[in-house]
Image (cartoon, rainbow, N blue to C red):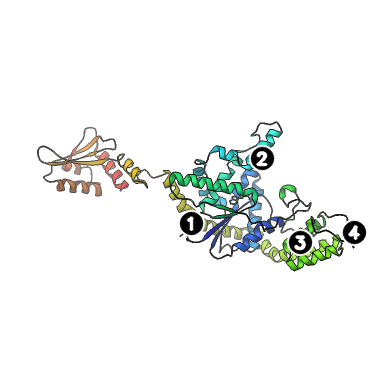
């Protein structure tokens, strides 16, 4: 059952890279903390359908999925307490993407930042606007909306670059609700301004695309070497240093307590040498990462166990997704033909498309009925009855149990060209529609 009165948070992580310190500080650590709040339900998933948009290396997607899954668990996420699953284990997400595609204006997608940036780049290069742009990239916001709407998430913690996607998801939910009834929760972006943006080795934002990352679970010696490569100015030991604009200081602050940060600030003023400052940074990071590293290693070394954890998570997520998708299919009209439909108007429309019984009284004073097919063509003409009640009871009997073909002879006559088996089929159709 979906609990009421809880706030649901949902986060997707695209499985194309190796988790780095920037991911840890900006997304993983705050999310793990947030997952423990009372009154919330938290959904974290490995967005591997999204990965296909950017990456055509199957082994990289698989490796990244494993690294990210292991990383989040090592960082303290409790899969029992949250919904932790792989997107492609919920194939209903792909189906929901289609339902949403059909309520989304193409023009809306034309305005998505990522798609527009690709088109603008092509235009600037004098190429055809859609060179190298897959329909997957174009559809990215719809897939993302399906992730969110499938689980009725209220809040989506994201960076500024993703806010537009959440707004689009909200619009899609609104259009769908308007057309088909109130099925979706309208999601909202939750941008946390207090979360640190971590600079990378070169001082720009730490990002795989700038090739300036420090992998969270790289061997300590590699982390030490990378830290040695962080850009600094050329001030010598003994010269006072600026914390303003110092990538090293900013990274330190993201891991340190306020007291530790104040101490480093003082050390800068006192002229700490860059080598010593880098040693402090290495030690501070290692203090936080070392305890997680063991858990990470044990998970990565046992992919079967990690897979088991993901499967358990997928099962939990599908228990929400599957019945909801069934409801949505019903709402849009992807229905069993025998289903009378949710709305009374539709039910009436459908009823006229079913075989039906007509009761009437003839001038001879007797009571009759006939069975007509969906188009109103006569199938079975009853013998006369002395009362309307007797005719009605015979109809009820026919509707309840399709009698063997021979019995129709006792009840009436088949219309020319109609076989007893046709009547049995018609009665079956009526029974299924009840
Ligand atoms: N687009 C997100 C990113 O690049 C990843 C993502 C996929 C996501 N589906 C989502 C984030 C749903 C939040 C909600 O970071």
Badge 1 density bin: few <14, some 14–19, many ≥20, Cα 10 Å: few
Instruction: Please give the residue where the numbered disc 1 appears in the rendered image.
Output: 319
**Alpha carbon of mark 2 to alpha carbon of mark 3: how far?**
34 Å
User: Label 2 belongs to which residue?
Assistant: 117
The answer to whether the beta carbon of the residue marked 1 is less than 8 Å from any atom of ligand 1 is no
Residue 104 at x, y = what percent?
52, 41
**SS for tag 2?**
helix
Q: Is residue 135 left or right of residue 383?
A: right
SS at mark 1 in the image: helix
Q: Position of residue 72 (x, y in %)?
A: 64, 59
Number of the front mark, 1 or 4: 4
Neighbor class of circle 2 (other Cα within 10 Å; few <14, some 14-19, many 20+) is few
Q: CA distance from mark 3 to mark 4?
A: 20 Å
* Residue for point 74% across, 48% down: 210
Mark 4, residues whose alpha carbon is within 10 Å: few (<14), some, or many (≥20)? few
**Mark 1 / mark 4, whichever is N-terminal:** 4
Which quadrant of the view contains residue 273? bottom right
Outermost residue to the left: 364
Q: In the image shown, does 260 or 14 lie closer to the viewer?
A: 260
Sequence-wise, the earlier of marks 3 and 1 is 3
Decide which of tag 3 and tag 4 comes sooner along the chain.
Answer: 4
- 131 vs 233: above or below: above
Residue that label 4 marks = 236
Q: Nearer the viewer, mark 3 or mark 1?
A: 3
Whole-number angstrom distance, CA of label 3 to CA of label 1: 43 Å
Say above or below: 68 vs 113: below
Q: Which element is circle 3 on?
A: helix
């Amino acid at each position: 059952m979906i609990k009421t009165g809880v706030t649901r948070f949902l986060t997707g992580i695209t499985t194309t890279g190796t988790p780095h310190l920037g991911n840890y500080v900006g997304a993983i650590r705050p999310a793990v903390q947030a997952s423990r709040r009372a009154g919330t339900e938290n959904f974290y998933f490995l967005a591997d359908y999204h990965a296909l948009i950017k990456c055509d290396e199957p082994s990289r997607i698989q490796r990244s999925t494993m690294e990210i899954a292991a990383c989040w668990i090592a960082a303290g996420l409790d899969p029992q307490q949250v919904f932790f699953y792989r997107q492609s284990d919920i194939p209903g997400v792909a189906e929901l993407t289609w339902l949403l595609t059909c309520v989304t204006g193409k023009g809306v997608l034309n305005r998505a930042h990522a798609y527009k940036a690709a088109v603008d780049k092509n235009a600037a290069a004098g190429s055809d606007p859609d060179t190298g742009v897959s329909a997957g990239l174009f559809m990215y916001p719809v897939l993302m909306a399906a992730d969110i709407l499938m689980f009725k998430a209220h809040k989506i913690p994201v960076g500024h670059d993703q806010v537009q996607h959440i707004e689009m998801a909200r619009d899609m939910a609104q259009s769908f609700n308007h057309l088909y009834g109130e099925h979706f929760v309208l999601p909202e972006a939750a941008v946390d301004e207090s979360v640190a943006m971590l600079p990378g080795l070169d001082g720009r934002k730490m990002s795989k695309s700038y090739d300036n990352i420090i992998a969270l679970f790289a061997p300590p010696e590699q982390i030490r070497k990378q830290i040695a490569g962080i850009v600094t100015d050329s001030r010598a030991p003994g010269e006072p240093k600026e914390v303003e604009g110092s990538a090293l200081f900013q990274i330190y602050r993201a891991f340190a307590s306020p007291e530790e940060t104040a101490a480093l600030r003082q050390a800068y003023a006192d002229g700490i040498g860059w080598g010593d400052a880098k040693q402090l940074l290495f030690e501070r990071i290692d203090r936080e990462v070392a305890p997680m590293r063991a858990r990470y290693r044990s998970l990565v070394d046992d992919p079967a166990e990690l897979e088991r954890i993901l499967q358990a998570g997928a099962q939990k997520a599908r228990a929400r997704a599957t019945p909801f998708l069934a409801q949505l299919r019903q709402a849009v009209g992807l229905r069993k033909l025998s289903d009378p439909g949710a709305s009374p108007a539709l039910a009436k429309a459908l009823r006229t498309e079913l075989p039906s019984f007509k009761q009437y009284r003839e001038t001879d004073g007797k009571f009759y009925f006939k069975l007509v097919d969906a188009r109103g063509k006569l199938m079975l003409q009853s013998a006369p009855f002395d009362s309307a009640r007797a005719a009605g009871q015979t109809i009820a009997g026919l509707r309840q149990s399709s009698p063997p073909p021979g019995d129709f002879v006792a009840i009436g006559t088949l219309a020319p060209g109609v076989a007893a088996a046709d009547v049995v089929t018609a009665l079956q159709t009526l029974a299924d529609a009840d």
